[in-house]
Amino acid sequence: MLLDLPIPYDVSEAEARLALAVGLFEEHKVSIGKASEIAGVEYHTFWDLLVEKGVPVAIYTADDVRQELENVNKIFTEHNSIRHQLSNRSHEYKTA
């Protein structure tokens, strides 16, 4: 789609594209990848611009956070179990 919009003289095309891209991203209308295309900048550059502007880049729901906490808990539980098993084996070798 091609838009022909009047832009104030003190706003460059690049600034207008960036403002549009940020606004669309903030409203969850486009992905960060699509927004970077609209802005005409690389993905990582757009990411950095969002961070500079204080725009949240990652949106987590309560369910997302809950799932992440469950994943972390599972990893720690597995890690402690493995650590315990290795500690027991080490102890067995020392006493043998």
Image: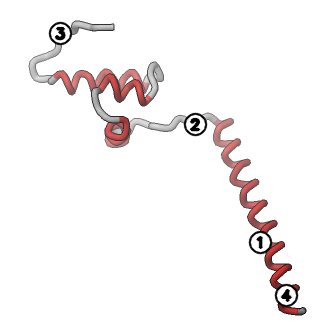
Judging by the rendered image, the residue that carries numbered circle 3 is: 6
Residue drawn at x 22%, y 9% is: 5
Is residue 62 shown left or right of residue 13?
right
Marks 4 and 3, how far apart in space? 79 Å
Residue 93, numbered circle: 4
Q: Which numbered mark, 1 or 4, is in the foreground of this view?
A: 4
Instruction: Label 4: state its secondary structure.
Output: helix
Is residue 44 shown left or right of residue 71?
left
Give the vertical position of 55 relative to 13 (above or below).
Answer: below
Give the vertical position of 3 relative to 87 (above or below).
Answer: above
Q: Which numbered mark, 4 or 2, is in the foreground of this view?
A: 4
Marks 3 and 1, how far apart in space? 65 Å
Q: Tell whether label 2 touches label 3 (CB within 8 Å).
A: no
Marks 3 and 2, how far apart in space? 36 Å
Judging by the rendered image, the residue that carries numbered circle 1 is: 83
Give the vertical position of 92 relative to 49 (above or below).
Answer: below
Instruction: Label 1: state its secondary structure.
Output: helix
Q: As shown in the figure, which amino acid type bears the numbered disc 1?
A: Arg
Q: As shown in the figure, which amino acid type bears the numbered disc 4?
A: Tyr
Residue 68 in percent (x, y) is at 66, 45
Instruction: Label 3: state its secondary structure.
Output: loop
Judging by the rendered image, the residue that carries numbered circle 2 is: 60
Marks 4 and 2, how far apart in space? 47 Å
Residue in front for this viewpoint, 91 or 51:
91
Q: As shown in the figure, which amino acid type bears the numbered disc 3?
A: Pro
Residue 76 in percent (x, y) is at 73, 60
